[in-house]
Amino acid sequence: MAWQNLLISRPARLSLKNRQLRCEQESGEVNLALEDIASIVLESPQITLTSALISACADENIVIITCDETHTPMAYSPAFYRIAAKQACCAHK
């Protein structure tokens, strides 16, 4: 069950390694299990994500929120397939 909400506020490279989120920063690197993550807030414009990680986040229903230079949330990325499937299900009722 997902319970962690990550806030990335410094430059970082986020990638996927062994079904875990890998966060590489100047201070070192950390690996976190995707099934424990509920959301990721990207507060720095100097954060890089791999497409494999984005796809895995969508698969695990992890929300990615991107902020602007004033740290205001600007983009919300839920899993597209889950939204489209829910809308199709509701349309048939």
Image (cartoon, rainbow, N blue to C red):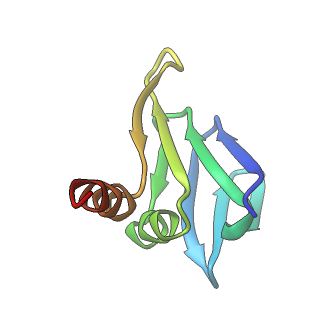
What residue sits 22% from the left and 55% below the top? Answer: 91
Instruction: Answer with the quarter of the image where residue 15 lies.
Output: bottom right
Q: Residue furthest front?
A: 93
Return the x and y of residue 18 as percentages of the image width and height.
64, 85
Q: How many marks?
A: 0
Instruction: Answer with the quarter of the image where residue 76 lies.
Output: top left
Q: Is residue 91 above or below residue 47?
A: below
Return the x and y of residue 54 as percentages of the image width and height.
44, 63
Q: Nearer the viewer, residue 41 or 69?
A: 41
Q: In which quadrant of the rendered image does the C terminus lie? A: bottom left
- Report whether 2 appears left or right of 77: right
What residue sits 43% from the left and 65% below the top? Answer: 50
Instruction: Answer with the quarter of the image where residue 28 lies.
Output: bottom right
- Report whether 25 appears left or right of 52: right
What residue sits 41% from the left and 58% below the top? Answer: 79
Return the x and y of residue 26 as percentages of the image width and height.
70, 51
Q: Nearer the viewer, residue 48 or 21?
A: 21
Q: Is residue 64 above or below residue 10?
A: below
Q: Is residue 17 above or below residue 31?
A: below
Q: Residue furthest top?
A: 70
Q: Nearer the viewer, residue 33 or 81?
A: 81
Q: In which quadrant of the rendered image does the N terminus lie? A: bottom right
- Report whether 83 appears left or right of 92: right
Return the x and y of residue 89 as percentages of the image width and height.
30, 62
